[in-house]
Amino acid sequence: MNQMELFPYVAAAYAESRGDALSNGDLYEQVAVRAGLSKATLDAKVPIGQAQAMHRPVPRTIRWVQQTLKRMGVIERVADEKGVWRLAEDARAKLKRVETGAKLLAFSTDLGVAIWARAQDIFPHLDEPIALCVTSPPYPLRQPRAYGNPTEAQFVDFLCEVLEPIVRNLAPGGSIVLNIGNDVFLERSPALSMYAERMLLALHDRLGLSLMNRIPWVNLSKPPGPTLWACVKRVQLASAHELVYWLTNDPARVRADNRRVMEAHTARHMELLARGGESRSAVYGDGAYRIRPGSFGQKTLGRLPRNVLIKGHACADTRAYRQYAAQQGLLPHGATQPTSIPDFFVRFLTEPGDLVVDPFGGTARTGLAAERLGRRWIISEWILEYLRGAAGLFQSAAGFSLNPALQHGGR
Ligand SMILES: C[S@@+](CC[C@H](N)C(=O)[O-])C[C@H]1O[C@@H](n2cnc3c(N)ncnc32)[C@H](O)[C@@H]1O
């Protein structure tokens, strides 16, 4: 098994240790049980390196994961005891918004980990190639959400600080996908803020990212607003979209493949195909487009997806999350995405086994989409209640393990 395959098992072993110290011997055994490895596999020795000294590769890999968790600040060495480690943070004492520097494994599966922490405290310590970061950062709303939003003046620096270590680890051709709101108005003005334009320029100038596409998420089920400008003063149109920006560090090697997100042909197109394609000849756009008899008669993989996402907010996962959060007495998240948004980008921009991250994890929809599609994932979120509620969506995932400190609600 490779390092990233063992990662969740090591993380789960520490998460379930309740903050108690764990010796390396106990850790190896727990990981072996979780990963279904026999004692013989755990103890098997192979010659390694130039000297061909005999080593046990599985414990070696486990120690590598342990060191990665240490670098991320999730576990710490127990003073004066060699090879004994424990979780760096005891959740029982701290709930709600995480304190600067504190980190806690909230839950994990065979494919991923959800960490209660500030994104700024986690990603600078991860050194693993990231194929995709798909996230919805807190953006500068006039009426901030319960989880807190940066002001317009803070937003660009805040986002660049969080994304910089992720971009540093982005695999060549990896992508950053950002979903932010379009309804940010200047103070006492019906004019829109240009924070998104400033953000894009900063991501290009400071982090070297190239813009691959602007993909509006059209959501016709949004309640009418902005109330003052559209409903009262009547000088604005009702909002119906958010912005999704897709960027990459290397457009020439971008790891996108639209064949992974083909849509079903319309009934009308299927009829056209059955007729053998067009029967007419026509010229459009001064000769730029031509239709000839037989055009569109070839069977193709499906309909090419357009660069617009047309989706309402309704989502079975959101309903399940809210129900679970209510049962657990948790405050629900007020700004969740339907899982179909990250699902689209995870399919389009990654392959099974790739690593997908979300620094602003919320209810872990990026993790959920990645989990269902067989991608590895790491998310961070600084409000414990959201992760506690999100854990309800992963209960049937292979290897699911919830930190026992979170077992009894988040309050
Ligand atoms: C727009 S919401 C993301 C919602 C998420 N996509 C979902 O569908 O549930 C932004 C999230 O970022 C979290 N957040 C804000 N600042 C953070 C930080 N510095 N580190 C980690 N999480 C943060 C907020 O608590 C909030 O849950």
Image: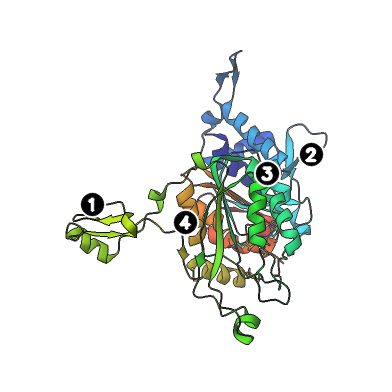
Residues at marks 4 and 3, CA–CA distance in whole angstroms? 24 Å
Q: Tell me the element at label 2.
A: loop
Residue holding disc 2: 78
Rendered image quadrant of residue 290: bottom left
Tell me where residue 53 appears, x and y as whole percent. Answer: 61, 16
Q: Is residue 96 visible?
A: no
Distance between mark 1 and mark 2 Cα atoms: 66 Å
Q: Is residue 163 placed above or below 43 in the rendered structure? A: below
User: Which residue is under mark 4?
Assistant: 344
Q: Determine contact: label 2, label 4, CB under 8 Å.
A: no
Residue kind at label 3, given as amino acid type = Pro
Query: In the image, what residue occupies the spot 52% across and 30% down?
Result: 41
Mark 3 — residue? 165
Where does label 1 land, which residue? Answer: 298
Task: Looking at the image, tell me whether mark 3 or mark 2 is earlier in sequence order.
Answer: 2
Give the numbered dot on residue 34. none
Q: Residue at x 74, y 56 (%)?
A: 91
**Amino acid, disc 2:** Val
- Label 3: few (<14), some (14–19) or many (≥20) C-alpha neighbours in 10 Å: some
Amino acid tagged 4: Phe
Measuring from the top left, give residue 2's x and y in whole percent.
54, 34
